[in-house]
Image (cartoon, rainbow, N blue to C red):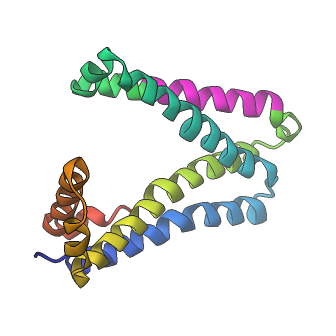
């Protein structure tokens, strides 16, 4: 079986570190250098988790479960329009609620908007980039150590096909693909 190149794994580690470091660095910078309040950071995190990962994901499951959901998924233009519209609706609604009601007392400093963005974008970077790279690293280690063969032998159906595709992508992709900084 093919192996995941060492350089790919190095790039996964770098991307993972960056994904988790971004929110920490921004938090420290805005707090220490710009004297931003702490609350907007954590409100940004909570808004992202609730509005994007809970509410928006629920709508996606419903929409893609309907007959026209397949039409959307199979048409690049419709999928892009749908994705952009859903992101706009949920993220902007979250921001409106956060700034209009929750963070009213923090509106005196413009830098608090940046602190909110650091929380919102930071948790997104950590979850999308950081956690994804942890999963990719775990898969890479299992591929390179040979454990993946045992795993592939014990699953079947769509799960087997998906995992085989993922293994193939991990071993065949150029290393720079995993460098997302």
The residue shown at (81%, 37%) is 103
* Quarter the N terminus occupies: bottom left
Residue placed at 32% from the left, 73% from the top?
11
Residue at the extreme right: 105
Q: How many marks?
A: 0
**Is residue 24 inside the magenta stretch?**
no
What is the quadrant of residue 122 in the picture? bottom right
Q: Above or below — where is 9 with respect to 102?
A: below
User: What range is drawn magenta here?
Assistant: 85-101
Measured from the top left, where is residue 138 in percent x and y? 36, 73
Place residue 67 in its image quadrant.
Answer: top left
Residue at the image position 70 percent from the left and 50 percent from the top: 115
Does residue 92 show up magenta in the picture? yes
Q: Position of residue 19 (x, y in %)?
A: 49, 63
Depth check: give the residue in front, 168 or 46. Answer: 168
Residues 145 and 179: in front is: 145
Q: Position of residue 131 (x, y in %)?
A: 47, 62
In the image, 131: left or right of 121? Answer: left
Please, is residue 82 above or below residue 54 in the view? above
Pick the quarter of the image with the C terminus.
bottom left
Image: 64 above or below 53: above
Is residue 31 rendered to the left or right of residue 122? right
Q: Main secondary structure of the magenta part?
A: helix
Going 66% across and 31% down the picture, which residue do you hit?
A: 94
Write down the quadrant of residue 136 in the picture: bottom left
Between 66 and 81, which is closer to the camera in this rendering? Answer: 66
179 shown above or below 93: below
Q: Position of residue 83 (x, y in %)?
A: 40, 29
Residue lying at the far left in this picture: please name it.
Answer: 1
């Amino acid at each position: 079986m093919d192996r995941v190149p060492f350089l790919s794994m190095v790039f996964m580690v770098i991307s993972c570190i960056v994904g988790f470091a971004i929110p920490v660095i921004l938090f420290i910078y805005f707090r220490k250098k710009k004297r931003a309040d702490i609350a907007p950071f954590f409100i940004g995190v909570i808004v992202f988790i609730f509005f994007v990962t809970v509410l928006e994901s629920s709508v996606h499951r419903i929409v893609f479960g309907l007959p026209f959901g397949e039409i959307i998924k199979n048409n690049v233009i419709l999928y892009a329009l749908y994705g952009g519209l859903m992101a706009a609706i949920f993220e902007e609604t979250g921001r409106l609620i956060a700034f209009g009601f929750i963070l009213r007392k923090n509106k005196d400093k413009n830098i608090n908007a940046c602190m909110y963005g650091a929380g919102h974008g930071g948790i997104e970077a950590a979850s999308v980039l950081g956690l994804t790279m942890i999963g990719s690293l775990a898969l890479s280690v299992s591929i390179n150590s040979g454990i993946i063969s045992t795993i592939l032998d014990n699953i079947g159906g769509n799960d087997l096909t998906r995992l085989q595709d993922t293994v193939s992508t991990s071993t065949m992709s150029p290393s720079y693909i995993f460098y997302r900084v």
